Amino acid sequence: MADSLRLGFLTVIDQLQPVERAVFLLADVFGVPFTEIAATVAKSEAACRQIASRARRRVRRPPAPRDAGSDRSVVDALLVAIAVGDVDRVLECVAPDVVCVSDAGGRKRAAPRPVVGGPRVARFLVNLAGRQSDRTAVLPAIVNGDFGLIVSLDGEIDLVTAFEVRGGRVTAIRIMRNPDKLARIGTPVALL
């Protein structure tokens, strides 16, 4: 549950612009005085107070409603393009500045650093899909509010992927292969 909360918080602050994020975190999370924040971000103290206030409102505001059908269509088109190895069609489905991040906890193979940019991400995904075998099963899923996949190998979950869609294109792909985190997939969590 702590990992889910952490990811939820990161997702929320990811909505903020870099300066907003810095001011919000320094002021509200770390309790740094606005005079120090102002010096850090090269803004006036009054501007930092206003930025913090605006960031708080953005964090508290519920997310804008998404066109789930459109998002699903984008993800489906991307998955088909990946499956057939069509790099050009993958590029049509992803944003030019798409980022793909993978986490294997040092226990499985994964990209050691984020893969950034349409062409690099397209090649990475097509190559990754090419390594799958007939022992692989793919199940569509909702992962942290985004459309995604649960991929199993010989009946055991091998990875979970989430695709973030904005403006009709995939802007972020998160691949989880860490066995410690995957062990909880499908397990009910008691909240009390």
Image (tube, grey):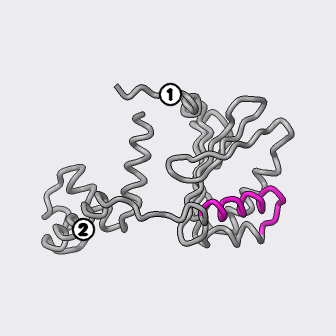
* Residue lying at the far right of the rendered structure: 134
- Amino acid carrying label 1: it is Pro
1 and 2 marks in contact (CB < 8 Å): no
In the rendered image, which residue does mark 1 sit on?
Answer: 188
Q: Residue at x 21, y 53 (%)?
A: 28
Residue 74 shown left or right of residue 81 in the figure: left
Which secondary structure class fits the magenta region best?
helix
Q: Nearer the viewer, residue 9 or 75?
A: 75
Q: Residues within 10 Å of mark 2 (few under 14, many from 20)?
A: some
Which picture quadrant has residue 138? top right
- Amino acid carrying label 2: it is Arg
In the rendered image, which residue does mark 2 sit on?
Answer: 54
Quarter of the picture containing the N terminus is top left
Q: Residue at x 70, y 42 (%)?
A: 139
Give the label, 1 or 2, closer to the camera. 1
Magenta highlight range: 71-87
Give the Cα separation between the discs numbered 1 and 2.
37 Å
Quarter of the picture containing the C terminus is top left
Q: Earlier in the sequence, mark 1 or mark 2?
A: 2
Element marked by disc 1: loop
Q: Residues within 10 Å of mark 1 (few under 14, many from 20)?
A: few
Q: Is residue 107 above or below residue 149?
A: above
